[in-house]
Image: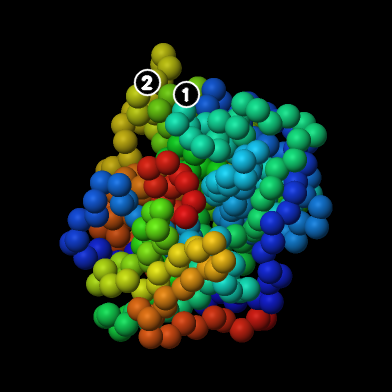
Amino acid sequence: MTSVGAAPKIVWRFATVIDVVHETPETRTLTLDVPGWPGHRAGQHVDVRLTAEDGYQTERSYSIASPPDDSRLALTVERLDDGEVSPYLSDELRSGDKLELRGPIGGYFVWEIATGGPLLLVAGGSGIVPLMAMVRHRDIALGAADIGARHRLPVRLLYSSRRWEDVIYRDELASLAEKDATLEVNHTLTREQPDGWTGFKRRIDRAMLEAVAWPATEQPRVYVCGPTPLVEAVAANLVELGHQPALVKTERFGPTGGSV
Amino acid sequence: MKKRATRKPKADMQPVDGNAAAGILSELFIPDLTAARAKCAGCGVTRTIGVLLVYAHGMGTVMRCPGCDRVVMRIARTPTHVWLDATGATSIAVAAPR
């Protein structure tokens, strides 16, 4: 049972946008300076609140992309055409602008070194964001540790995207996997594949999980994040393959990825 | 993640995970409640609150047991309050700080 600790009360605070990076055509990473930020754990999220001139307020949750080891907070936002918040975050925000947020939120869908492994991460679309915080955290925390430490905590990531252009953190994942034999990245591109593509070309199914995932006997810690249909199907398949439900943690984004 | 009860949610009522209620729960409780354990008043099974199914809509948030579908917690926001009905939880256990 995870200790919830003597956590400070979560309050709304203003962050300053330092940087906006276009990761893919539909996603942006906002780097923020958050005075008084209490620190966070990989997998947690923030709630962002927008207030219109007439006082109307709307909130959405966004997973934290940066690892706890970074001094700045990064959020990766997927732009939804009919979104109330994401178009503003994606198109309007500039360096120097302020953003109201509260966090870090969530103590269930978190991973840290002490949680252990092996680690199986399954992402659909922007579901990669909290999992990337975990991958980054592992890389930094294990940093200069001996190769044995990495071998005791190996990671397999299965990441479903529509097209190669939609893969968030694509180059960073490739470079991390290249230098770290204990990090394995598997992509599946469900709508369109580049010429010469030899990887998976379909939605994640039981056969793909069987091929890519750790066997249930290894008792991996599993984190699945993305749209609800993907998360439910993957979790059900993993349980069918013998993984203990208690070791499979899910974060469904729902149809629009909004907050409560 | 246990096998769900066979009640089919309406198309606009797709559930998300307990994690999605962590924000509003943080207005009621200081420790993170999604890592806490709740005993369902319906089936008597104790589960981590993070695995409850969250149905959020304009009127508020409903958290259901993934095993028996009973409403465990109901949260609503009024102009002056955040309101919680936790009668679907026989007990809630929060781990002591380390």
Name the residue furthest top: A195
Image quarter for residue A125? top left
**Residue at horizontal 65 percent and vertical 38 percent from the top:** A53
- The residue to which callout 1 is attached is A164
Of helix, strand and loop, which one carries label 1?
Answer: helix
From this view, report whether residue A146 is shown above or below residue B35: above
Q: Distance between the residues labelled 1 and 2?
A: 8 Å
Q: Which amino acid does label 1 sit on?
A: Trp
Name the one closer to the observer, A104 or A109: A104
The disc label shown at residue B14, or none: none
Label 1, residues with CA under 10 Å away: few <14, some 14-19, many ≥20: some
**Residue at horizontal 52 percent and vertical 31 percent from the top:** A79
- The residue to which callout 2 is attached is A192
**Residue at horizontal 58 percent and vertical 45 percent from the top:** A56
Left or right: where B62 falls relative to A100: left
Q: Position of residue B83 (x, y in %)?
A: 49, 71
Left or right: where A104 falls relative to A212: right
Q: Are marks 1 and 2 in contact (CB under 8 Å)?
A: yes
Mark 1, chain letter? A
Name the one closer to the observer, B55 or A20: B55
Label 2, residues with CA under 10 Å away: few <14, some 14-19, many ≥20: some
Q: Where is residue A62 in the image (x, y as percent from the top left)?
A: 57, 46
Identify the colour scheme used.
rainbow
Question: Can residue A182 be seen by looking at this rendering?
Answer: no
Name the one closer to the observer, A83 or A193: A83
Left or right: where A237 falls relative to A8: left
Asked if marks 1 and 2 fall on the same chain, the answer is: yes
Image quarter for residue A227? top left
Of helix, strand and loop, which one carries label 2?
Answer: loop
